[in-house]
Amino acid sequence: MRVKSWLIVLAASLLIAGLGHNQAHAAPYEGYTYNYWGDAVKSPIAFLPSRVITGDEAGTGTWQSPLDLYAAKNGLLYVLDSGNARIVVLNEKWERVRVIQDFKHDGKQDRFLNPEGLFVTEAGQIYVADTENKRIVELNQDGSFVRAIGAPESDVLSDTFEYFPRKVIVDKAGRIYVVGRGVYEGLIEFDSDGRFTGFMGTNRVQFDPVDLFWKTVSTKEQREKMIRFIPLEFNNADVDDGGFIYTTTADKNTLSAVKRLNPSGIDVLRVNGEFAPVGDLSINRSSFIDIKVSSHGVYRALDSTRGRVFTYNEDGNLLYVIGQLGNQVGTFKNPVAVESYGDAIYVLDRDLGRITEFKATTFGSLVNEANRLYSSGKHSEAAKLWEEVLRLDANYEMAYVGIGKSMLREGKYKEAMTYLKLGNDREYYSKALAKYRREYMREYFGMYMTITIGLLIGVIAWRRIARARNERRIGDVAN
């Protein structure tokens, strides 16, 4: 009997050790977020790598320097195999559906030349930024040619303007937006007929005050040798269901690495916290090279500096971070594109020629669902999930804020203040405090007034009694 018990304990120990080993193998990076003070705080891992695929494993041959990836809403995955000048289409099982390598154009066979960008509409139309051919190519779902959109033509363009389209997106109205190499004026906009209509969302000029001072005191010859102050160029873009365009800028010194442009080209990105969505807050800042907009205002930005994916909600709050540079499964050598479909995140690695899929852990699923309910206005339901999140991570400030806002809506102002303070949300803490004061005074106003009036009456009565005593004392002395 003792031997049997000993064997059970040994088996359990081996099982636990095995689970620990598998978990360590499956999580080659640490999870973290940033707190109110800008300090990195450890957090449970939100997504873990679930599978990896290469061109050889997909049956399409080795992918050479793939540069872009698109996950369509019908489950198809499009890989822009740039080095081989082709598009590889995979289904949800990552099986080959088709390979688009050439197409008939004006009766002749045509091919891409170093393409860098890919976009697929809900109708299945494929748009390719055919970079070195200086055009945007539209194809049908089967890969047949529809049209080519060449360089923009307008009197506002300078004679030195060069057109090398790098990325392309299309909104529901059919408007086409292009990220051009060396184009600082903003996104190049075409209407649905392919006519150039102007630039959109120009970045503000970034400059160093020290450099500006030296420019003012330098000679003409010295100024000509200095770096000119020019706007930063966009390096990628995506569009949400509402027609808002999200852009990324790779410069590490900018405070607007991510923008959300309305139809007028004005940045309307929410920044609810103390820090804008810029990735890592350390000295070696992040450099975003791709962005993917998901549902309920969630967006993910890919950092090329450390190979990480930062996920933010519609208020600009950091939800979680996954990935890093490395050689293990779940890490990258040169990540170039991020996509998402359902509960999965995909990252394309250019140098390794492979796609890594990540699936949500229990923690990640709770955060995603709580944020979805929160974004939908279902604060009470979200609060229950935020409580589950806090059981897994007691330092997760977003959960405290979510619960605090739920209590604020329910009229539990004092409890809301406690949670909002823990979440370091000063704005909503002030709102809860103001409502708590108002409610407190409304509830106890009658009692305080009764006490105040009673005290006043007591003081008046005491004064009259004291005065009467003084008058009697004076009369006695006079007699």
Image (cartoon, rainbow, N blue to C red):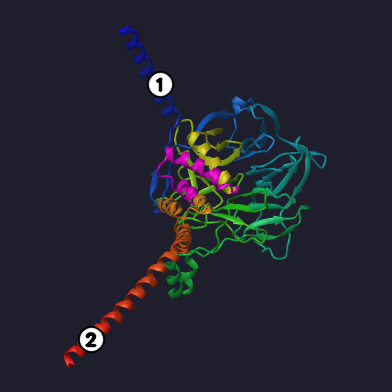
Label 1: which secondary element: helix
Label 1: few (<14), some (14–19) or many (≥20) C-alpha neighbours in 10 Å: few
- Tag 2, which secondary structure? helix
Give whichever of discs 1 and 2 has the lower sequence position.
1
Residue 99, above or below 401: above
Q: Position of residue 100 (x, y in %)?
A: 71, 34
Task: Say how many tags the image has.
Answer: 2
Residue 275 screen position, x and y as percent:
46, 55
Q: Residue furthest right?
A: 107
Residue 249 lies in magenta, yes or no? no
Identify the residue shown where x is 60% and y is 44%. Answer: 294
Q: Which label is found at residue 349?
A: none
Q: Is residue 135 depicted above or below 101 in this figure?
A: below
**Quadrant into which the N terminus falls:** top left
| Residue at the disc numbered 2 | 472
Residue 308 locus on image (x, y percent) = 48, 42
The crowd level at tag 2 (other Cα within 10 Å; few <14, some 14-19, many 20+) is few
Of the residues tagged 1 and 2, which is closer to the observer?
2
Which residue is nearer to you in this view: 70 or 217?
70
Q: Quadrant of residue 339?
A: top right
> x, y percentage for residue 354?
56, 32
Task: Say which residue appears at 38% left-offset and 50% top-offset.
Answer: 39
| Residue type, mark 1 in image | Gly
Q: What residue is drawn where x is 41% and y is 52%?
A: 418
Q: Identify residue type, mark 2.
A: Arg
Q: Which residues are magenta?
A: 376-404
Q: Nearer the viewer, residue 289 or 217?
A: 289
20 or 403: nearer the viewer:
403
Pointer 1 residue: 18
Q: Depth check: 34 or 296 in front?
A: 296
